Structures are given as structure tokens and as C-alpha cells.
Amino acid sequence: MISFKEVKPAMFQNKKIIVGVSGGIAVYKACTLVSQLVQEGASVKVIMTKNATEFVSPLTFQALSRNPVHVDVFDELDPEKIAHIDLADWADFFILAPATANTIAKLAHGIAEDMLLSTILATKAPIYIAPAMNVNMYDNEAVQTNMKLLEKRGFEFIEPGAGYLACGYIGKGRLEEPKEIIQAIQNHRKEHQRLKDVNVLISAGPTREIIDPVRFLSNRSSGKTGFAFAEEAAQLGAQVTLVTGPVQLKTCHPNIRRIDVTTADEMYEAMHTYYPTSQIVIKTAAVSDYKPVETHTDKVKKQPGNLSIEMERTKDILASLGESKTTQFLVGFAAETQNVLEYGLDKLKRKNLDAIVINNVKKTGIGFESNNNIVTYINKNEELTEYPLLSKHDMARRILKQICEQRDDLQ
């Protein structure tokens, strides 16, 4: 008899995964989940709450994971390491299954009273939460509010299944089957790496046009939009080059290469340097349209009467990128105060863009220096997508998804 060995996907091969187990009757499914992850080639470590140990012994998870199981936050076996910090740093990602209403509530409010909660709060790894509880508990406003709060903070939820529950009710609240949890994570992580190996070039912030050693002309751009796009693109696997004017923001993602510039001329040179090797280019920077004809080497002294400074046009970075475009997907931004759609459409066509993002900066609480924005995305076919008030990170995430879909249609 000929047998065929099943080829396992590489998604979990050699991945370091923590499975967090809180106290509910669905703990038995977590045993299967751990076993299947190990079979997929993952290295799995389990953290249990004390209530979870009332349902299944830690020894069971130790046998299935082939690693010690952690329960007590004060059980520090290695004096050279703090256990929950070491685990938090070790993990590639974290699966909380089952997640009870109690654990979700404590996590939403930053309570770190045990090993499981302390590790989750300390990790920078992606976290997937699979709730399991009574249908009425799941529908309770407090539980729903806590889950929405965690979603806003970047936690990913795997919805429970519907059916007969251990309490006798029939409805939504049953822990999703282990194979479905694994499939949901696989699908999400594929989407999460949608820009893997794609070179993305982003400009951000203002420029400064120098008058003399102590004075310059600039604008109110904080760079927050460009930095949000850089971080979200990096999270999607892109290799990001961020060309930024003078801002007070930091970059920490290893996929972001930061190029600091000051003037419009310096930004022009930097953008054209990295443009040929980029596949996606997003120009969010608020570049000065004019610069002084003369830059003084010494401070201009105060004099009687008015002062006139002769100005000349700076190079149009976006137009020049549009003229030299080959295969790049080029996205521009337009901050307007009137006739927003009209000016945005004109800029889209005139500068040979693939898409443009426009907003009215006169609206209170959005735009420059704000953490939020209301924008309209217009693609090359002049199809409009209007976004409501969103954080700049959420806006960047949604627009990057549109860019990916539009690029897929072109290829």
C-alpha cells in the first residue's frame, strides 16, 4: 500500500508560540490546539491561570507541548531571568484560548495579577484572542465593550462558534474548533504579510527653508500621517524608506530606514535617490512651495520699517516623480481648505498619480498636528472612498489595503 505524507504549511514551522489558557470548560479544546500547533512544527509554551488548572492538569499541557507549563508569576526558576518578561520577549505570537469574560475584562483594564496577564501585557508579539463563554455573557454590553477596546489596541479576535454550550444554552459562545483557530491565524498572518519584500518609499513632515542661521519658513505638518503609513506598511512586511523633514517623532520598527532632511531640495534629492527601486511611493510630506532667493550666512538684524524677502519656487517633488514613473504605484496627498474634491482630482491627473488622498484641513480636530483625520481616497479611475473620522494609524491601514488591492488589479 502506498501512503502519502501530508505536506504541512510553513506558516508555523519553527515559530515560537505561547498559548494562554484561562479557566473555562473549553480548556479541553486548548489541549488539541497545542497538539496541532506542535504537529505544524511550532515551538509551543503554555501559560495557565490557576482556575484553568481546575479543569486540566498542567502536566497534560507539558506532555503535549514538550515544554514546562507556567502558572505562578512568582515561580522564578532561573535567577538570571524574569520569567514573564523572558516569555513575552520569546514569543513570535500569542494565542489566548479559551479567553473567559473575566480574563478579557482584566486584560482590557491592564490588570496584571497573574502569570498569564503579566506576560500578555509585557509582550510586543501579535495577540489572538478566542473567547468562550455563555451566550448571554458574550452578548453582555460590558464584555462587548471590553472586546472592542482590545480590538482598538491591536488585539485580534477569533469569533466563537454557535451551538450547544456546556451550560445548556444554545447560541454563540462556544470556543472555535482548534483547526479553525489555526486557519484563522494563517489567513490573518498571510494578510499581515501582504507587502512582504515590497519596497515602500514614504515622505513625511514639513520642510524648512532657511532665511538665516536663526530663522526659517515652514508649516504646521507634524509628520504623524507619514509615520503612521511607515509603521503600518512595515507591519505588513514592507521594507520602508521614510524620508522625513524635521519632526519630534521616533521610528522603532526594524523594517523602517529613516532618512532625515531639512529643505525641499534635500527632500527632492532623497526621494529621487530611492524612487527607482521602490514599488509603492506615498508622499505625505508638506513641502514648502517657495524658498528665499537668498540665504544669509549671518543673522538678519532688525531694521526700521517692513522687511521683504524675495521668494522663488521649489522643485515640485510629486510632479517630478509622476513624470519619471515607470512601474511605481504613486500616491499623493492634498491638504486643501476649499474646493477639496475639485483640487484633488486636478492634482491626481496633472501629476500622473495612481491615487490621491485629500482632506479639508480647515475642519476642527483633524489634519495637521492632530492624531485623527477625515479623508477621501480617489484612485486613477476617479472612484471615491470617503473615510469617516479615524486615527491616522487606522486610516493608513485601510488605505494601504486599498493600495494593495489596486496594485493586484493592475498586475
Image: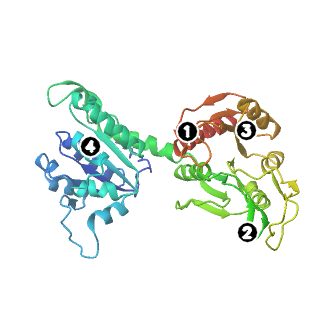
Quarter of the rendering occupied by the C terminus: top right
Disc 3 to disc 1, C-alpha distance: 16 Å
Looking at the rendered structure, the number of numbered marks drawn on it comes to 4
Which residue is under mark 2?
A: 214
Q: Residues within 10 Å of mark 1 (few under 14, many from 20)?
A: some
Q: Nearer the viewer, mark 4 or mark 2?
A: 2
Q: Look at the image and tell me whether residue 292 can be seen.
A: yes
The secondary structure type at the circle numbered 4 is helix
Which residue is under mark 1?
A: 398
Q: Which residue is rendered at x = 21% and y = 59% of the image?
A: 69
Q: Nearer the viewer, residue 376 or 125?
A: 376
**Residue 354, which numbered label?**
3
Give the left or right position of residue 69, taking residue 54 as reference: right
The residue most toward the bottom is 80
Q: Nearer the viewer, residue 285 or 310?
A: 310
Which residue is under mark 4?
A: 105
- CB-based contact (under 8 Å), mark 1 and mark 2: no
> From what the image shows, is residue 269 above or below residue 82?
above
- CB-based contact (under 8 Å), mark 3 and mark 1: no
Q: Which residue is rendered at x = 69% and y = 55% of the image?
A: 206
> From what the image shows, is residue 388 above or below residue 224?
above
